[in-house]
Image: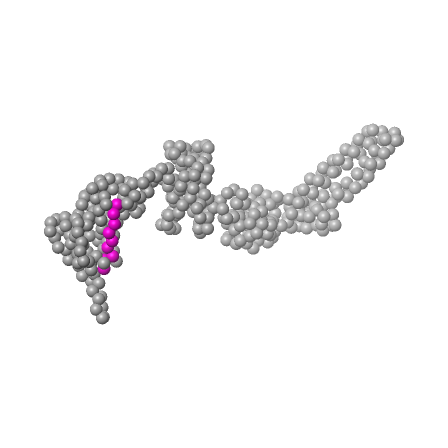
């Protein structure tokens, strides 16, 4: 249970939990305060112990200055794939769901279209024709060299063969893009379906294909994300960008999911300003094994400067009418502690510490735990 010290209109009271143990039960009661004047309080050693109070002194702590910004968790472009088909067709098979893991080269879905058959027929026809044109070209070349035929006939045969060769090579590459083996086509194995395979390993992030649906070649069928290398993509305004440099520390949190703070480092700073007068800053995570999801919104602070200052824990301060106070130990013995309420001035603050500007309480023991409510 936390212990609080609060000021009333007459005197300062310490409210604590005092355990009074017997063989059967524990009771709670108010800490008794012996008042010598308005700024002095005395508590017993038993009360100090049972209320988990703690003494400490001013210590040197690290404070920092930074740029507040926001952004999101992202992955490199090479780790994100939008899968499309080389030609449009009807979805024949699609069994993957969002979140499924896939390996590189794994079958994602199959598509069907009569046009696939036509391309294979054209390839097979030009393949058979190519053999004849190659033979005819060789024959015309021999006749021309022996001056039996004209140069015109030889050049036409050569042109027909080269033209057919170009068509043949183009259709073969098209078949390979459609994941159809040209060797199977040469053997007369013509299919009306094509298979779509995963270009990268990762997890399925979106599925846009339903059975029986016709999809054009320009339409995305499936999205895959490999999140093995997650990073921060931050947005910094033009007025602050000159303060940002590679290697600076980044502290960030995921406000919608956790209050925990995480660390990263500035890896790249954009070299141009977009239409919103902002610059992208790329940050590497300190721990990529954290369960972040790609696209998560983050609030971040890029640390641009840091320095050591004398400080006290926030929990040791009491704020009253814009003034701050601490309890300084005046004396102690085996039975009691006597504290004096002392006004102090503070400077920079963070979540845990406050800089102390006046050092008249330096090297003095101060009640740093169990004293006051933490400052909001």
Residue in the image at 17% along x and 49% along y: 330
Q: How is the image coloured?
A: one colour
Residue in the image at 14% along x and 55% along y: 33
Q: Nearer the viewer, residue 192 or 364?
A: 364
Question: Where residue 68 appears, x then y in whole percent?
Answer: 36, 39
- Is 74 positioned to the left or the right of 155 in the image? left
Q: How many marks?
A: 0
Question: Where residue 129 appears, x then y in whole percent?
Answer: 77, 41
Q: Nearer the viewer, residue 128 or 80?
A: 80
Magenta stretch encompasses residue 170: no
Say above or below: 212 vs 344.
below
In this view, which residue lies farthest toward the bottom? 23
State whether residue 166 appears in this view: yes
Magenta region: which residues?
50-58
Question: Where residue 177 appears, x then y in whole percent?
Answer: 64, 44
Q: Nearer the viewer, residue 251 or 157?
A: 251
Question: Where residue 180 appears, x then y in whole percent?
Answer: 67, 48
Give the quadrant of the N terminus.
bottom left
State whether residue 6 appears in this view: no
- Is 45 positioned to the left or the right of 91 in the image? left
Residue in the image at 33% along x and 42% along y: 62
Residue in the image at 65% along x and 47% along y: 179
Magenta stretch encompasses residue 54: yes
């Amino acid at each position: 249970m936390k212990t609080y010290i609060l000021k009333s209109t007459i005197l300062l009271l310490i409210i604590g939990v005092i355990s009074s143990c017997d063989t059967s039960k524990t009771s709670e009661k108010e800490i008794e305060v012996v008042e010598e004047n308005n700024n002095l309080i005395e508590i017993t050693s038993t009360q100090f112990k049972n209320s988990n109070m703690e003494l400490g002194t001013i210590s040197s702590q690290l404070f920092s200055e930074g740029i507040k910004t926001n952004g999101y968790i992202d992955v490199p472009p090479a780790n994100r794939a939008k899968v499309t088909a080389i030609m449009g067709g009807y979805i024949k098979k699609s069994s993957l769901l969002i979140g499924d893991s896939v390996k590189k080269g794994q079958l994602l879905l199959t598509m069907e279209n009569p046009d696939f058959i036509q391309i294979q027929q054209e390839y097979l026809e030009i393949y058979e024709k190519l053999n004849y044109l190659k033979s005819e070209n060789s024959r015309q070349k021999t006749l021309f060299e022996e001056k039996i035929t004209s140069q015109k006939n030889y050049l036409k045969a050569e042109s027909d063969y080269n033209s057919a060769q170009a068509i043949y090579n183009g259709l073969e590459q098209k078949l390979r893009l459609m994941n159809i083996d040209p060797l199977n086509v040469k053997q007369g194995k013509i299919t009306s379906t094509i298979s779509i395979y995963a270009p990268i390993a990762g997890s399925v992030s979106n599925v846009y294909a339903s059975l029986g649906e016709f999809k054009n070649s320009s339409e995305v069928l499936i999205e895959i994300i490999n999140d093995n290398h997650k990073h921060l993509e931050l947005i910094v305004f033009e007025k602050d960008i000159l303060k940002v440099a590679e290697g600076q520390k980044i502290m960030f949190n995921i406000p919608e999911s956790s209050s925990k703070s995480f660390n990263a480092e500035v890896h790249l700073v954009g070299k141009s300003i977009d239409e919103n007068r902002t610059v992208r800053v790329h940050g590497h995570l300190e721990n990529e094994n954290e369960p972040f999801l790609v696209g998560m919104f983050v609030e971040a602070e890029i640390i641009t400067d840091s320095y050591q200052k004398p400080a006290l824990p926030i929990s040791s301060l009491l704020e009253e009418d814009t003034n701050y106070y601490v309890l300084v130990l005046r004396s102690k013995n085996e039975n009691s502690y006597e504290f004096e309420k002392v006004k102090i001035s503070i400077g920079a603050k963070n979540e845990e510490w406050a800089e102390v500007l006046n050092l008249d309480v330096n090297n003095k023991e101060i009640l740093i735990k169990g004293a006051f409510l933490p400052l909001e």
